[in-house]
Amino acid sequence: MGQALVLRQLLAESAARVIAVTGCSEGGGRTAAVVNLAIALTRQGMDVLVVDERPGERSASAMLGAIRAAGVFGPAIHGTLPRVLAVGSRRRQFAATGAGYTDDENFPGHVALESTPDIVLIDAALDGNGALSQLALQAHDVVVVMHLSADAVADAYVRMKRLRLAQGIAEFRLIVNLLDGEADTHAVLESLAGIARDYLAVSVLNAGCISADPSIAQAVELSRCVVDAFPASPAAGDFARLAADMQSWSGRPAASWRLPATTHTACGPAQVH
């Protein structure tokens, strides 16, 4: 039995909220968003597990590993960071970092969680057809991280279309990353939500926006993330608000977004007649 299958079964039996995060293109900030949200949630008292389906030099597990190695955490984190599981593309490539793990005697070479996390964030990999893994398909929410540009909006639509056709995903939450304060986010997301509703029968929710902030680049230079390095910055405040909002997202069965559902606009639920 593969490690990802073991983890999938464990999460299916737990009460953890599972959130799969994907992006429109490389460089969209999806992995940085996962790491910052994970640390923001930890600051708010949540037990967080990050599942890294895209391990590598610039992956979520690498970023959290560098932050852990730096050994400098804000006082609100109390010296802890989210737990991390890196699941490679090969079936048996599996690694864990952080406290809270034991060897699984039933599955030699595997890792078992000592406690069930409150929230699981999956930095989700997509296959050649643009489909999510079976683990990510178990999520309660699918989040798309995007920039606010014409190309990024078009990419977001294509990403949602592929996931809708391949796996029946009918609801997405959008995070707009590196937002210029002068951009009309409401109008753009309202338009995208309308197109997705009319042509894909897909619901789109605005999960929140992350400000374009020079502190983000400064944190990267320190091998840290903005929530950890500059907690008073505008971007860190945005991540903190989004993390708080995540905890109040409507409760529902995992993968229920694959069923026909009430359509939403970019700013909230609205029944389509």
Image (spheres, rainbow, N blue to C red):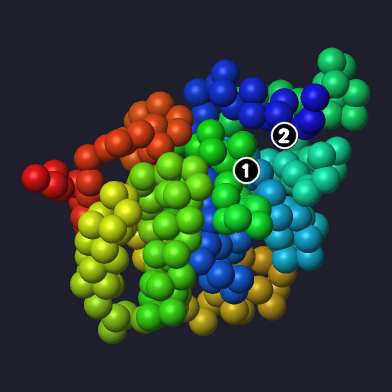
- Please tell me which residue lies in front, 80 or 31: 31
Residue 27 picture quarter: bottom right
Res 251 seen here: yes
- Residue 194 bears which disc, if any? none
Query: On the image, numbered disc 2 is attached to which residue?
Result: 4
Judged from the image, the secondary structure of the residue bearing numbered disc 1 is loop
Name the kind of residue labelled 2 in the image.
Answer: Ala
Instruction: Between label 2 and label 1, give the one nearer the viewer.
Output: 1
Describe residue 2's horizontal placement relative to residue 26 as left or right.
right
Whether residue 228 is visible, yes or no, is: no
Which residue corresponds to the image point at 61% horizontal and 37% vertical from the top-left? 134
Viewer-proximal residue among 151 and 110: 151
Q: Which residue shows up at 75% across the image and 46% down it?
A: 86
- Which residue is situated farthest in the top direction here? 106
* Residue 209 location (% of width, % of height): 37, 65
Give the mark nearest the N terminus, 2 or 1.
2
Residue under label 1: 133
CB within 8 Å, label 2 to label 1: yes
